[in-house]
Image (cartoon, rainbow, N blue to C red):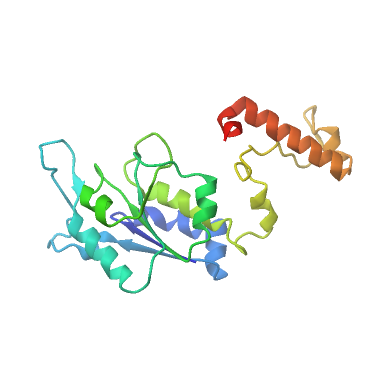
Amino acid sequence: MRIDILSVVPELLDSPLNQSILKRAQAKGVVEIHVHNIRDWSKDKFRKTDDYPFGGEAGMVMMVQPIFDCINDLCSQRKYDEIIYTAPDAPQFTQKVANELSLKENIMILCGHYKGVDQRVRDYLVTRELSIGDFVLTGGELPACMMTDAIVRVLPGAMGDEASALSDSFQDNLLAPPVYTRPAEFNGWKVPEVLLSGNHAKIQEWQEEQSFARTAAIRPDLLQD
């Protein structure tokens, strides 16, 4: 799989994309992640990528030309299954979406910035828009990192124990059950006896009960889906 990320501040992406599971997945050849500076496609001598919005609204808007040229250049080299724009006013990114995108071969993620991008980018260039929540960030770099992490970690070979990702929250529309590790007792706080029993059927039953109980208490909306 290949993921191309387009940004005006690519430095924000350096550390998150080169640590932990993402780093190992790239080293193992499970995924290629390439970050592109949109300023490299600017025709302005100062590499400007934004301008004032028509209509007099406050703030700055990312111009269509550098984004168009960047996307056009990359699309001339390979076919992209999705060109994603990170935006707060977009459908929610979920584990189901991450699983779906992990089956793609090539995806591109455009990071918004300032007041966002010229609407023509959204109308004619991107194929999908995704949000990580009902709030506004300075730019789309952090959402792009989060989406990339969620997508890559479910790729075969990305994690040492692939079954671990399958038991994460939201994989089956349930929150994950509580987890414990050694010591079995600390400061008088004990691990539930069933987890120490060695009875795998009982343990699985307990985990399923806990998942339903936690979901009902914290995210009852998931049970309605």
Residue at the image position 49 percent from the left and 56 percent from the top: 101
Q: Front-most of 36 and 166?
A: 166
x, y percent for residue 218: 60, 27
Residue at the image position 69 percent from the left and 35 percent from the top: 211
Q: Quadrant of residue 219?
A: top right
Would you place residue 125 above or below residue 203 in this image?
below
Residue at the image position 70 percent from the left and 37 percent from the top: 177
**Side of 177 relative to 146 (left or right):** right
x, y percent for residue 173: 61, 40
The answer to whether residue 23 is visible is yes
The answer to whether residue 183 is visible is no
Q: Front-most of 222 and 38?
A: 222
Q: Quadrant of the C terminus?
A: top right
Residue at the image position 56 percent from the left and 64 percent from the top: 25
Residue farthest bottom in this picture: 77
Would you place residue 97 above or below residue 72 in this image?
above
**Side of 128 relative to 146 (left or right):** left
Q: Front-most of 174 and 10?
A: 174
Would you place residue 5 above or below residue 85 in this image?
below
**Side of 215 relative to 61 (left or right):** right
x, y percent for residue 70: 26, 64
Residue farthest front in this picture: 225
x, y percent for residue 16: 46, 54
Q: Front-most of 85 and 142?
A: 85
Q: How many marks?
A: 0
